[in-house]
Image: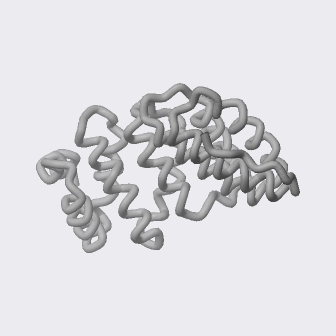
Amino acid sequence: MSNNFWRNILYDSSKQLVVDSFKDCEKQPELFPSLLALAEEQKSKYSQRAARIVTYSIEKRPDLFGQYINEILYFIEITHDESIKFCFLKVFTFCELPEDEEKLGLLTKIAFDATMAKVERIAVRIYAIDILYRISQLIPELKRELLYVLEKYMQDAPPAFSNRATKYMNMLKKEFGMKEEIIDY
C-alpha cells in the first residue's frame, strides 16, 4: 500500500478518523507499514495524523502492532518534528519497555534528553518524565538522577511540566523514605 493511499484517507485529524483508520489496519494489518512510513516522512500534516493513528493502534492492539516498537524507538531519536515525537513517546508510556539493555539504554537517553530540552510541545517533556519513572522502577539506580533532573528543570517550567515533575518527585522521595513532600506551585 502506498503513502498516497493514506494521504487520501487522512483528510482531517478527527478522533473518528483515527478510530476508523485503526479498524482498517486491524482488519488488514498489511496497511500498517505504509502508515508508519508516512509518519516517518515528517513532511506534512499527514505525517502527524499517521503518527497519531500508529500510536492509537499500538495502544489498542499491542499484540498486532507491537512488533513496530523498535522501529519507532529508533525513529524517535532522529525526528525533529515535536508532534510526531510526542505521539511516539506516548507509546512507551503504556507498552512494555524494551528488555534489551541497548534499546532500554537508548530509550533512557532519549527520555532524559527530551526532559531537559527546550521544546514547544510540552507533551514531549511530560511523556519523557512518565517514561523515565517507569524505567527507574526497572533500574533503581536512575531514581536519584531522575529526582535531580526534575528538581533542576522544574524551576521556570510550564505548569504542566511542574505538576508532573512534582507528582514524580513526591513519589521518588517517598520511595527514598524522605519525609519532605514538594508542594505543587
| Residue in the image at 28% along x and 65% along y | 22
Observer-nearest residue: 136 or 10? 136
Quarter of the picture holding the N terminus: bottom left
Q: Is residue 90 above or below residue 44?
A: below
- Colouring scheme, one of rainbow, by chain, secondary structure, one colour: one colour
Q: Is residue 24 above or below residue 160?
A: below
Q: Position of residue 108 (x, y in %)?
A: 67, 44
Horizontal side of 57 relative to 177 (left or right) equals left
Observer-nearest residue: 104 or 152? 152
Q: Position of residue 60 (x, y in %)?
A: 40, 69
Q: Residue furthest right?
A: 177
Observer-nearest residue: 100 or 165? 165
| Residue in the image at 86% along x and 52% along y | 178
Q: Is residue 177 above or below residue 163?
A: below
Can residue 103 be seen here? no
Observer-nearest residue: 184 or 30? 184
Q: Position of residue 91 (x, y in %)?
A: 49, 55
Can residue 163 be seen here? yes
Horizontal side of 157 relative to 33 (left or right) equals right
| Residue in the image at 51% along x and 42% along y | 160
Query: Exactly how many numbered labels are in the figure?
Result: 0
Q: Position of residue 45 (x, y in %)?
A: 24, 38
Quarter of the picture holding the C terminus: top right
| Residue in the image at 45% along x and 40% along y | 85
